[in-house]
Amino acid sequence: MTAYSSARHEFTGTANIFLDANENSFGSPLPENYNRYPDPLQLKLKEKISSIKGVPAHNIFLGNGSDEAIDLLFRIFCEPGKDNILIFPPTYGMYEVCAEMNDIKVKKVSLTESFQLNLEATEAAIVANTKMIFVCSPNNPTGNSINRNDIEVLLNNFDGLVVIDEAYINYSKQKTFIPELTEYPNLVILQTLSKAWGLAGLRLGMAFAGEPIINYLNKVKYPYNINTVTQQLAIEALGNISSVNNWTKTTVEQKEWLKDELLKLSFTQIVYPSDANFILAKMTEARNIYEFLSDKGIIVRDRSKIILCDDCLRITIGTPDENKQLLEALKVYNS
Ligand SMILES: *Cc1c(COP(=O)(O)O)cnc(C)c1O
């Protein structure tokens, strides 16, 4: 296919009169002007990300959240009604939703009791039309990182794409797979500004991959998928890395504190180890606790009906004050 060629795409020189895109040349009825279409390839923003992540700009794709990259991967690499993908439940729900929306079958190999990959079952589940494997590490909702060696076994032996979702990598003791991009042409890494960077409302997801894959993503995406405001604010935010590092450090400290405190409560059975900004906790009567908390205006995520997560709540680490209030409420429930 030929990609849509936008006016701003075709012109690369310098000019100061733009009469090529049928924009309103007068301006916008706002304090700032947004009358011009945004850069379709977000080059300035990619340069900034490149300098932080150590990835060349031509190995970066930006989407309207990671969700856009996930959807585009299905549309590019899978044929509806014919192909399938592999996921490892319990994991992020979007892979399956996106697959179903694109009429792609989902094969599931559940994680082991310790929330790691079952490589034998994985090998058995892969068939000729298996095109992608999604590995979420650190995993949502379990919080743990997937063993690096196991992911490398997939990368070395699977013919299709291995997509590693690193949405929570900033909180993890494990290292990103970004340095491995040069080794593996079938590797796609997803990261996002929605979690540690505190920009969920801006909607900016990143995919890192070899140039052939990035070129396909750019070809299939909507021409102006990242709006001007998001591009400008993301560049500004990426310059403030120190506050992000401070929040991340506090979150990790608070996570340890909350874990210790939860374990003192009689209804807490297990607090699973977490490399993310949330913890998964097994509690007697998880649903009742969920409802008790939500009556008090504190919302956590009830995961108690999910495979391997019986009676589990997923609790995001908040500010120290929020975490204290959560704990006080749980103590009331306990008494
Ligand atoms: C939160 C989350 C994302 C982020 O998605 P965005 O669309 O970038 O907000 C991606 N993957 C996982 C596993 C997540 O938990």
Image: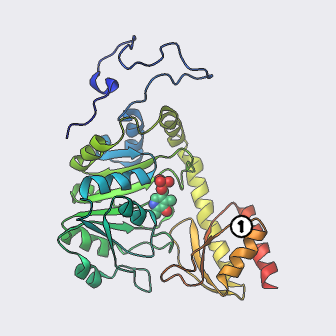
Determine whether, in the image, residue 191 is placed left or right of residue 80: right
Q: Secondary structure at mark 1?
A: helix
**Is 145 above or below relative to 220?**
below
Q: Residues within 10 Å of mark 1 (few under 14, many from 20)?
A: some
Residue 42, horizontal then vertical, whole percent: 39, 35
**Pointer 1 residue:** 323
Quadrant of residue 132 within the rendered picture: bottom left
Determine whether, in the image, residue 272 is placed left or right of residue 263: left
Which residue sits at x=37%, y=52%?
A: 69
Which residue sits at x=25%, y=36%?
A: 3
Q: Amino acid at mark 1?
A: Asn
Residue 16, horizontal then vertical, whole percent: 39, 11
Q: How many marks?
A: 1
Q: Nearer the viewer, residue 233 or 123?
A: 123
In the image, farthest residue toward the top? 17
Q: Is residue 169 visible?
A: no
Which residue sits at x=56%, y=20%?
A: 28
**Quick one: quadrant of the N terminus?**
top left
Q: Nearer the viewer, residue 75 or 150?
A: 75
Residue 238, horizontal then vertical, whole percent: 50, 42
Which residue sits at x=57%, y=51%?
A: 198
Quadrant of residue 246 within the rendered picture: bottom right
**Quick one: quadrant of the C terminus?**
bottom right
Q: Is mark 1 within 8 Å of ligand 1?
A: no
